[in-house]
Image (tube, rainbow, N blue to C red):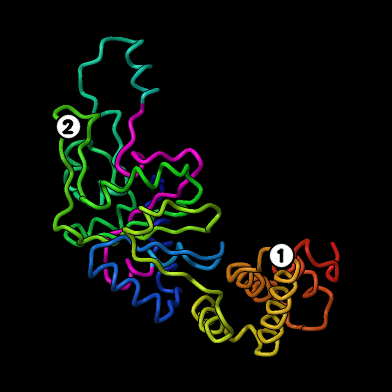
C-alpha cells in the first residue's frame, strides 16, 4: 500500500493509535516479539482491531510506521520491493533504455523498515507516511502485514528468508544492493490473519503468536470511552447498556446459527450512529433500524429492512 495523503495518513495513525485499548496479554505479546526479534502473528475475527495494534505501537513507542494490505494477488517480493514491468516495456517501445532501472523500482514496507536511507538513495521514492516517519528517521519501525491469509499459501513461505535473516538483495537494481536490518531485530513486524485459510506450519513456527479474543463488556466500555472522547456524554449509559445487550444477543444467535459474530467495529458503528444522529430513545423504531443496519444486519428479521 502506498501513501498518497501524508497529512491524512498521519492523522489516521495518531487517531487509531490513541483510541486503541490493548489487553494485558496483547501488550505482553508485543514485548516478547520485540525482545526476541520475531514477527508477531495476530489471529482474530474481522473487525476485532488486529490491524490497529500497529498504529498503537507506533504512537506509544514513537516508531516509524509502514503497512501492506495483502490481497489474493500479493507475491512475496511485494513486501520487499515492486518492479514496474509495464512502464519499463512502454519506455522501451519509445526509445532505448539508459540502464537506470531505479525508475521502475518501488521499495516495499520491509525495505523501508530495514534501511530507510538505502530506499531513499537507491530509488528516490517518496517515503510512505512521510510526515509521520521523517521526524523519526533514526527510530526503529513497526510494519503491518495485514490479512496475510488472503494471499496464496506460497506467499508466507516466500517470506521465511527475509523475516528470519532480516536481509535481502534487490535483484532488479544494478549491482543487486543488499538491504540489511540495522540493528538486527530492531523492528516489530505485525502480521494479521482472519484465519480464512491455514498458514504454513514453518511460517507460524517463526512467529510469536497471539489470538485476539472477542472484547468483553469491560473492554468495550473502555473502547467506547476512547473513541467518543469529549462526546462520551452524548451517549447515555442506558443506551450504551442497551447496545451492549443487543451485541451479546446477536452474537449468541450468530453462534447458534453458525454465522459470523458481530465485531467490535460493527458495535462502534452502532455507537457512532446513535451519537451523530442524536438517537436517545431505547424503545424507538429508529434505534431498532440502526441496530439492524449495524449489529444484526440482514441476519435478524426483528429489525426489518
- Camera-side residue: 122 or 199? 199
The image shows a total of numbered marks equal to: 2
Does residue 252 appear left or right of residue 24 in this picture? right
Residue 1, percent from left and from top: 41, 46
Q: Read off the residue under disc 2.
A: 176
- Camera-side residue: 117 or 213? 213
Position of residue 39 relative to residue 212, above or below, is above
Does residue 218 appear left or right of residue 290 in this picture? left
Residue 33, percent from left and from top: 29, 67
Residue drawn at x 85%, y 71% as measured from the top left: 302
Position of residue 154 relative to residue 41, above or below, is above
Residue 211, percent from left and from top: 46, 69
Task: Verify CB contact (< 8 Å) between mark 1 and mark 2.
Answer: no
Provide the secondary structure element on which disc 2 rests: loop
The residue segment tinted magenta is: 56-84
What mark, if any, has residue 258 been given in the picture? 1
Position of residue 214 relative to residue 193, above or below, is below
Residue drawn at x 70%, y 70% as measured from the top left: 255
Does residue 74 appear left or right of residue 57 in this picture? right
Q: Quadrant of the C terminus?
A: bottom right
Closer to the chain start, of discs 1 and 2, is: 2
- Camera-side residue: 172 or 165? 165
Position of residue 130 relative to residue 21, above or below, is above
Disc 1 crowd rating (10 Å Cα; few below 14, some 14-19, many 20+) is: few
Amino acid at each position: 500500500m502506498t501513501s498518497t495523503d501524508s497529512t491524512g495518513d498521519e492523522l489516521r495513525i495518531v487517531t487509531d493509535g490513541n483510541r486503541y485499548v490493548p489487553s494485558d496479554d496483547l501488550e505482553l505479546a508485543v514485548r516478547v516479539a520485540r525482545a526476541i526479534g520475531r514477527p508477531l502473528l495476530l489471529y482474530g475475527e474481522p473487525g476485532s482491531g488486529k490491524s490497529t495494534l500497529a498504529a498503537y505501537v507506533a504512537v506509544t513507542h514513537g516508531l516509524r510506521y509502514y503497512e501492506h494490505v495483502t490481497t489474493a494477488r500479493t507475491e512475496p517480493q511485494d513486501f520487499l520491493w515492486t518492479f514496474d514491468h509495464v512502464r519499463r516495456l512502454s519506455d522501451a517501445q519509445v526509445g532505448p533504455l539508459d540502464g537506470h532501472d531505479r525508475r521502475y523500482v518501488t521499495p516495499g514496507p520491509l525495505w523501508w523498515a530495514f534501511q530507510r536511507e538505502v530506499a531513499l538513495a537507491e530509488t528516490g521514492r517518496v517515503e510512505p507516511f512521510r510526515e509521520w516517519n521523517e521526524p523519526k528517521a533514526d527510530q526503529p519501525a513497526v510494519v503491518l502485514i495485514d490479512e496475510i491469509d488472503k494471499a496464496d499459501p506460497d506467499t508466507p513461505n516466500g517470506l521465511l528468508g527475509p523475516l528470519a535473516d532480516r536481509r535481502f538483495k534487490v535483484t532488479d537494481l544494478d549491482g543487486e544492493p543488499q538491504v540489511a536490518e540495522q540493528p538486527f531485530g530492531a523492528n516489530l513486524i505485525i502480521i494479521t490473519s482472519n484465519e480464512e485459510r491455514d498458514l504454513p506450519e514453518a511460517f507460524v513456527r517463526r512467529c510469536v503468536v497471539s489470538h485476539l479474543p472477542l472484547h468483553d463488556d469491560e473492554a468495550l466500555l473502555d473502547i467506547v470511552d476512547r473513541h467518543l472522547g469529549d462526546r462520551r456524554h452524548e451517549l447515555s449509559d442506558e443506551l450504551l447498556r442497551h447496545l451492549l445487550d443487543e451485541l451479546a444477543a446477536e452474537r449468541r444467535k450468530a453462534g447458534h446459527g453458525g454465522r459470523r459474530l458481530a465485531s467490535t467495529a460493527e458495535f462502534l458503528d452502532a455507537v457512532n450512529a446513535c451519537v451523530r444522529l442524536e438517537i436517545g430513545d431505547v424503545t424507538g423504531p429508529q434505534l431498532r433500524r440502526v441496530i439492524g443496519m449495524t449489529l444484526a444486519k440482514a441476519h435478524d428479521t426483528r429489525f426489518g429492512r
